[in-house]
Image (cartoon, coloured by chain):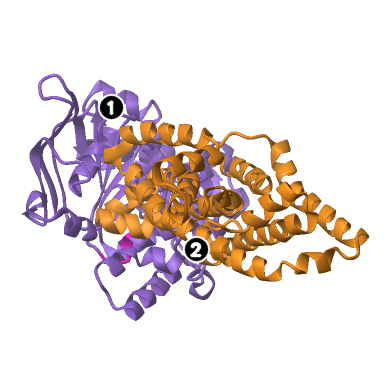
Chain colours: A orange, B purple
């Protein structure tokens, strides 16, 4: 299931022109969730006792789903409160030179597989929720920092010049001009980041943080399809739901004048 | 009202830097438009930006209303000066109303008052407030954006305005319309305006004073008439172009150049009267006035044959020119209709005088002497 989410991310990125990617990958990324859905529904249909088999895990799904959501909320929340300020600081003129280097380092960091990061976190922080949240936070951070930075840097210079010439203080220029005009791109980063976060969270099970990964990995190990699906389907639904909610926020919170969706 | 004293800006290290503006001094009286004109890179924009301290001068002083701007907090200073930039720079995240009210909001005006002001301003440029207040910049045409950009600078009713090529990003037809609109507003608003431009025609049209820049130095500071008739240096002469006397035509009103009161004949005068008057004045044609003082016909000297009455010799008047229009349109009419003499009429169409080619040349020459 994590593969699906990662593909979706790669698909969302080229629209922002922030990350390399081909149009074909974008289309493929869009198709994969539907393929998964069709296969899942098909399986369900042809083995008529499958729904009942899955529902025997109902209690596990609720408990582990709660854990899963908590992991995502902690890691995602942490990534928001650290990533947005980091992107803002990097976009300030004083950091112009440092920013490019810092983003290169961030980019390099993002090439390390999340599984490896989580494994590294385990060696440094032991097992449990803390290293899992830390690892997910690392994986979630980059798109937020990158989009915040790029969104702010891409605000046309003439707007800042006009604001300055009309007597706005630097703080007013930031809150009234720069930030609102970067908001759409920032939201796109958040959307991408949280999709990664939900999709990567099952890996947390591997270092003892629970979550829906427990059903998925155990299901794989035992070759138990209903158990596997009991993990996969809620994870997929959670990813879609997260994307949908952030999309709604993006639609309503970004001012109409600069919101291409409205 | 605005006075520049030895204003200098050097970029880079002192001594080895580039001098963008070099000891520029001039004074713009209250209520006048001063156009800073020159090729790109001549220092005109830098000069303008030193007035609201977007660029700090290396040396020299700027006084607004007798106050040295370096003693005013730059933020307060900029809020007290209307500012229009070349790319318009409307904030796309704000509605038209919020864009116009940026400075009033910064100054903490009552919201109702500022929004009412925005509506009033929109009405001044013929944009329906009900339709436009709630729109976003992307929903406006280029010309509408440009208008809102100017209104934004007028919103807080600052007595001084800085305009950096404000009509540069717009097609020529709309530019003329907006220029006229601005001049019309300026008549009542009487702002003191510093206006950066690289377009000579625009400068001649808009300016009370033109400051010509070249490589950071002020080459000449004069009224458009004076500049066109007495360019101070060969550089300015080249910059103004070989057709500068045609540009001058635009600045002279018909009523200042026409011959008045004009010699006229009546329809029942004999043609010999017309002939005598023409040989006396040397004009190639004479206007026949009908009873109520309207031009009824035109008699050309080289067409008069023998005897008869004027009404038989007269040709119909193909065109008249209003006394309030400029010489350029008069000359255009004369060329178009092949009229060596054109009647000049007031709003009711009554004959006030006549323009001949020679009277035009003479008035251009006299503006040269007067300047």
Q: Secondary structure at mark 2?
A: loop
The stretch in magenta equals B153-157
Apparent side of residue A54 relative to residue A70 in the rendered image (left or right): right
Q: Quadrant of the N terminus of chain B?
A: bottom left
Mark 1 Cα-neighbour bin, 10 Å: few <14, some 14–19, many ≥20: some
**What is the chief secondary structure element of the magenta stretch?**
loop
* Residue B13 falls in image quadrant: top left
Question: Is B110 located above or below residue B252 in the figure?
Answer: below
Q: Residue A152 in the image: x percent, y percent?
A: 41, 47
| Residue at the extreme bottom of the image, as rendered | B112
Residue wearing tag 2: A255
Q: Is residue B266 visible?
A: no
Which residue is located at x 35 percent, y 67 percent? B101
Q: Secondary structure at mark 1?
A: helix
Which residue is located at x 53 percent, y 33 percent? A111
Q: Nearer the viewer, residue B230 or B267?
A: B230
Mark 2 Cα-neighbour bin, 10 Å: few <14, some 14–19, many ≥20: many
Q: Nearer the viewer, residue A103 or B29?
A: A103
Does residue B328 show up magenta in the picture? no
Question: Is A3 located above or below residue B83 in the figure?
Answer: above
Which residue is located at x 34 percent, y 42 percent? A90
Which of pointers 2 and 1 indicates the residue nearer the eye?
Answer: 2
Residue wearing tag 1: B236
Q: Nearer the viewer, residue A37 or B212?
A: A37
* Residue B213 falls in image quadrant: top left
Spatial CA distance of label 2 from label 1 is 49 Å
Question: Label 1 lies in what chain?
Answer: B
């Amino acid at each position: 299931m994590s593969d699906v989410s990662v593909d979706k991310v790669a698909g969302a990125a080229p629209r922002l022109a922030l990350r390399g990617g081909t149009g074909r990958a974008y289309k493929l990324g869009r198709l994969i969730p539907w393929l998964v859905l069709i296969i899942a529904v098909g399986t369900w249909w042809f083995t008529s006792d499958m729904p009942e088999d899955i529902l025997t895990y109902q209690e596990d799904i609720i408990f582990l789903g709660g854990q899963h959501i908590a992991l995502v909320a902690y890691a995602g929340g942490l990534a928001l409160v650290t990533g947005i300020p980091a992107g803002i600081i990097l976009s300030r003129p004083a950091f112009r030179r440092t920013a490019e280097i810092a983003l290169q380092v961030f980019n390099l960091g993002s090439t390390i597989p999340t599984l490896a990061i989580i494994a590294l976190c385990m060696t440094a922080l032991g097992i449990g929720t803390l290293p899992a949240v830390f690892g997910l936070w690392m994986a979630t951070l980059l798109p937020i920092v990158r989009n915040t930075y790029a969104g702010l840097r891409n605000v046309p210079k003439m707007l800042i010049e006009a604001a300055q010439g009309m007597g706005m203080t630097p703080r007013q220029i930031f809150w009234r001009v720069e930030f609102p005009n970067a908001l759409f791109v920032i939201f796109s980063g958040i959307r991408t980041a949280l999709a990664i976060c939900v999709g990567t969270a099952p890996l947390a099970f591997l270092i003892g943080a629970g979550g829906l990964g427990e059903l998925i990995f155990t299901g794989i190990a035992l070759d138990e399809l209903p158990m596997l699906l009991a993990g996969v389907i809620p994870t997929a639904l959670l990813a879609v739901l997260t994307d949908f909610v952030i999309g709604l926020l993006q639609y309503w919170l970004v001012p109409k004048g600069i919101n291409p969706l409205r | 009202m605005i006075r520049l004293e030895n204003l200098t800006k050097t970029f880079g290290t002192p001594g080895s830097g580039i001098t963008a503006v070099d000891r520029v001094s001039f004074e713009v009286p209250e209520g006048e438009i001063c156009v800073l004109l020159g090729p790109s890179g001549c220092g005109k924009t830098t000069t303008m930006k030193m007035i609201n301290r977007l660029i700090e001068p290396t040396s020299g002083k700027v006084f607004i209303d007798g106050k040295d701007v370096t003693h005013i907090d730059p933020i307060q200073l900029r809020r007290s000066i209307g500012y229009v930039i070349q790319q318009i720079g409307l904030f796309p995240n704000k509605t038209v109303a919020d864009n116009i009210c940026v400075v009033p909001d910064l100054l903490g005006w009552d919201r109702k008052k500022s929004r009412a002001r925005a509506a009033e301003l929109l009405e001044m440029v013929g944009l329906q407030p009900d339709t436009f207040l709630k729109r976003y910049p992307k929903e406006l045409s280029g010309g509408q954006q440009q208008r809102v950009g100017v209104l934004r600078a007028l919103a807080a009713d600052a007595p001084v305005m800085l305009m950096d090529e404000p009509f540069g990003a717009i097609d020529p037809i709309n530019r003329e319309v907006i220029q006229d609109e601005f001049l019309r507003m300026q008549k009542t608003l009487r702002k003191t305006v510093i206006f950066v431009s690289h377009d000579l025609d625009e400068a001649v049209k808009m300016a009370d004073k033109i400051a010509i820049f070249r490589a950071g130095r002020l080459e000449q500071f004069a009224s458009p008439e004076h500049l066109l008739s007495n360019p101070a240096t060969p550089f300015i002469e080249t910059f103004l172009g070989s057709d500068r006397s045609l540009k001058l035509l635009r600045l002279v009103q018909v009523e200042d150049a026409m011959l008045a009161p004009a010699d006229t004949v009546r329809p029942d005068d004999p043609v010999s009267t017309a002939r005598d008057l023409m040989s006396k004045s040397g004009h190639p044609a004479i206007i026949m006035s009908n009873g109520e003082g309207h031009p009824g016909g035109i008699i050309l000297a080289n067409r008069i044959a023998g005897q008869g009455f004027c009404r038989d010799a007269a040709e119909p008047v193909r065109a008249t020119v209003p006394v309030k229009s400029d010489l350029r349109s008069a000359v255009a009419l004369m060329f178009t209709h092949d009229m060596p003499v054109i009647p000049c009429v007031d709003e009711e169409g009554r004959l006030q005088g006549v323009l001949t080619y020679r009277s035009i040349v003479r008035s251009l020459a006299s503006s040269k002497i007067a300047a």
